[in-house]
Image (cartoon, rainbow, N blue to C red):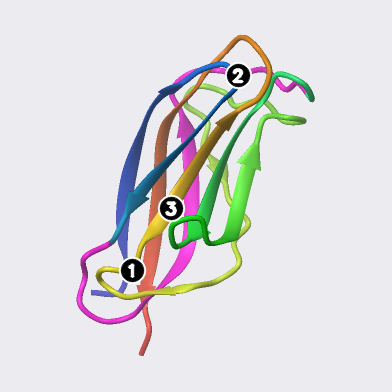
């Protein structure tokens, strides 16, 4: 197998809330988190005060690997946003944290984060 993807569903996160989702990929061996996308299920306008962000961390509360935000570019329903990632290796049971934040009032963050892994040879 050259690559595989792991989708992580995000239920609606509303005003002034922070939530985390922890996942592991479960595949034998070491894998590089090579790419990731956030597909919003709801449009959230670009707004420096009332914005959402979705981050990927290496482990629970760990180092940030990348974040997308609607602070200056809207989350548009059905339009994927690509993360700019700092590479990290993950074994089958290593924790990957999806960090969802909603600042300000109004709107919500929901959708799917898709993590794409390539094998370490």
Q: Which residue is mark 1?
A: 94
The numbered mark at residue 97 is 3
Counting other residues with Cα less than 10 Å from the Cα at mark 3, is it few (<14), some (14-19), or many (20 or more)?
Answer: many
Side of 104 relative to 36 (left or right): right
82 up-or-down from 85: above or below: above
Look at 57% across and 33% down and name the residue there: 101
19 up-or-down from 44: above or below: below
As helix, strand or loop, the secondary structure at mark 1 comes to loop
2 and 1 marks in contact (CB < 8 Å): no
109 up-or-down from 54: above or below: above
Counting other residues with Cα less than 10 Å from the Cα at mark 2, is it few (<14), some (14-19), or many (20 or more)?
Answer: many
As helix, strand or loop, the secondary structure at mark 3 comes to strand
- Of residue 39 and residue 50, the one placed in the foreground of this image is 50
Residue occupying the far bottom of the picture: 121
- Of residue 71 and residue 116, the one placed in the foreground of this image is 71
The numbered mark at residue 45 is none
Look at 66% across and 24% down and name the residue there: 103
As helix, strand or loop, the secondary structure at mark 2 comes to loop
Instruction: Examine the image and state in which quarter residue 119 appears.
Output: bottom left
3 and 1 marks in contact (CB < 8 Å): no
Name which of mark 2 and mark 3 comes first in the sequence.
2
Q: Nearer the viewer, mark 2 or mark 3?
A: 3
Residue occupying the far top of the picture: 106
Q: Which residues are magenta?
A: 25-47
Give the Cα separation between the discs numbered 2 and 3. 22 Å
């Amino acid at each position: 197998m050259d690559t595989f993807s792991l989708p992580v569903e995000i239920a609606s996160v509303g005003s002034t809330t922070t939530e985390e989702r922890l996942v592991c990929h479960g595949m034998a061996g070491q894998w590089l988190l090579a790419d990731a996308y956030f597909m919003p299920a709801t449009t959230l306008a670009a707004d420096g005060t009332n914005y959402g962000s979705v981050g990927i961390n290496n482990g629970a509360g760990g180092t940030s690997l990348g974040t997308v935000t609607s602070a200056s570019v809207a989350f548009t329903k059905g339009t994927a946003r690509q993360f700019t990632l700092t590479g990290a290796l993950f074994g089958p049971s290593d924790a990957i944290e999806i960090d969802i934040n909603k600042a300000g009032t109004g709107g919500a963050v929901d959708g799917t984060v898709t993590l794409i892994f390539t094998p370490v040879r």
